[in-house]
Image (cartoon, rainbow, N blue to C red):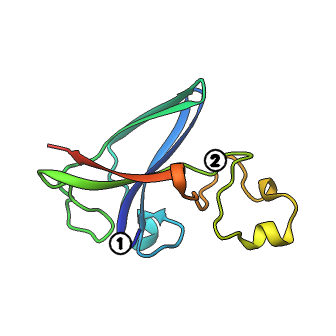
Amino acid sequence: MDCTDIVLGSARGVYSRILDYYTRDRSTPRLDSFWGGSNSISSATGWETNGKTTLIFRKPLVASPPSPTDHSLNSGTMHVIWAVGQRPGAYVHSPSSGLERESPSVAAFYAEDEVKYHGHRDQRGVTFIDFT
């Protein structure tokens, strides 16, 4: 996820939060403002029903003013990455992390709705979208 513009959101019932993030390397994403940018999401909503989360947001197709934290959505097909958080009872660490070696409960580390490592396998992926 090096130099990646990220929209990160969560929902609990009818309440949601959806914000503009950036990561310059493989560390935890930070709000754009941390890197001197600004939140370019103009509107957003989300909800959770029967264990399914729906997030909807608006963000300009062209980053303006130019900023290292906001990337333009170019015409044509774009490479889009996605991830979901660790699921209770189905934590993914391969190879095992220090949590498994030093603590009997990984669940104590992964509280719900926190931004932490998403794991892999079915918890992250890539898709291609034409935003125009």
Disc 1 to disc 2, C-alpha distance: 23 Å
Q: Which residue is pictured at 52% across the width and 72% down the height?
A: 27
Q: Amino acid at mark 2?
A: Asp
Q: Quadrant of residue 36?
A: bottom left
Where is residue 122? Give x, y as percent. 52, 49
Q: Nearer the viewer, residue 6 or 96?
A: 96
What amino acid is at disc 1? Cys
Q: Is residue 80 left or right of residue 118?
A: left
Within the image, what quadrant is residue 12 found in?
top right
Location of the N terminus (image quadrant): bottom left
Counting other residues with Cα less than 10 Å from the Cα at mark 2, is it few (<14), some (14-19), or many (20 or more)? few
Q: Quadrant of the C terminus?
A: top left
Judged left or right of residue 33, residue 110 is: right
Q: Which residue is mark 2?
A: 113
Which residue is denoted by mark 1 in the rendering?
A: 3
Tag 1 secondary structure: loop
The answer to whether residue 17 is above or below residue 116 is above
